[in-house]
């Protein structure tokens, strides 16, 4: 990896709908809930207006196969909570971003990319930010084949 693999961006504030999964594969649980909520509204047809972010919540703990995963989809001011879907606001912030293209179910690449991004931050002029770490889903139409494209967003402060 070189310094050109990382972009520094400011993620703007946004309103989002949040869904949650917990267990051995919470990402899949959360995706099912997100699709159930977003697809009938046409949100998945307009990814530029309805960006999707996810993160562990809580992180995996040693000795347990269970952990949580939360997904956010950007929504407008008129969005209302439904069933298990919460509506919240996010303040945005400064982030280091690295692209991660998972192929053929090689999900270990996500952890490897996070490690590389943290190493980049440690060698940079930036401090660790206090806002939420995020994984933005860029392409997920082949997820059933173990393929997803993510941008990993590491919070920064100056």
Image (cartoon, rainbow, N blue to C red):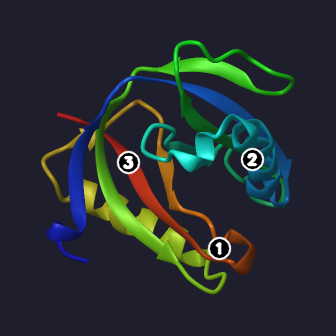
Spatial CA distance of label 1 from label 2 is 14 Å
- Compared across the picture, whether 116 is left or right of 51 comes to left
Residue 89 position, x and y percent, is 52, 18
Q: Using the image, determine if residue 30 lies above or below residue 94.
A: below
Question: Which residue is under mark 2?
Answer: 35
Q: Nearer the viewer, mark 2 or mark 3?
A: 2
Q: Nearer the viewer, residue 123 or 142?
A: 142
Q: Nearer the viewer, mark 1 or mark 3?
A: 1
Q: Nearer the viewer, residue 117 or 89?
A: 89
Direction left: furthest residue:
125
Q: Nearer the viewer, residue 123 or 155?
A: 155
Spatial CA distance of label 1 from label 3 is 25 Å
SS class, disc 3? strand
Spatial CA distance of label 2 from label 3 is 25 Å
Residue 98 position, x and y percent, is 34, 62
The circle drawn on residue 154 is 3
**Quadrant of res 16:** top right
Q: Using the image, determine if residue 67 lies above or below residue 155.
A: below
Sequence order check, earlier mark of 2 and 3: 2
Question: Which residue does the image show at 48% across and 51% down from the upper left?
Answer: 136
The circle drawn on residue 142 is 1
Q: Residues within 10 Å of mark 1 (few under 14, many from 20)?
A: few
Question: Which residue does the image show at 25% across and 62% down from the upper left?
Answer: 120
Residue 126 position, x and y percent, is 19, 44
Query: Does residue 122 show up?
Result: no
Residue 65 position, x and y percent, is 84, 61
């Amino acid at each position: 990896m070189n310094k050109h693999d990382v972009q520094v961006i400011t993620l703007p504030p946004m309103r989002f709908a949040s869904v949650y999964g917990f267990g051995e594969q919470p990402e899949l649980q959360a995706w099912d809930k997100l699709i159930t909520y977003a697809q009938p509204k046409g949100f998945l047809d307009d990814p530029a207006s309805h960006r999707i972010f996810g993160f562990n919540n809580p992180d995996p703990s040693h000795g347990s196969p269970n952990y949580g995963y939360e997904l956010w989809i950007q929504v407008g001011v008129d969005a209302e909570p439904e069933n298990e879907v919460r509506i919240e606001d996010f303040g945005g912030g400064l982030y280091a971003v690295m692209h991660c293209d998972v192929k053929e179910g090689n999900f270990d690449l996500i952890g490897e990319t996070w490690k590389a991004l943290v190493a980049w931050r440690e060698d940079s002029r930036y401090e660790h930010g206090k806002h939420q770490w995020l994984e933005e889903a860029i392409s997920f139409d082949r997820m059933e084949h173990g393929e997803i494209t993510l941008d990993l967003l590491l919070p920064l402060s100056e």
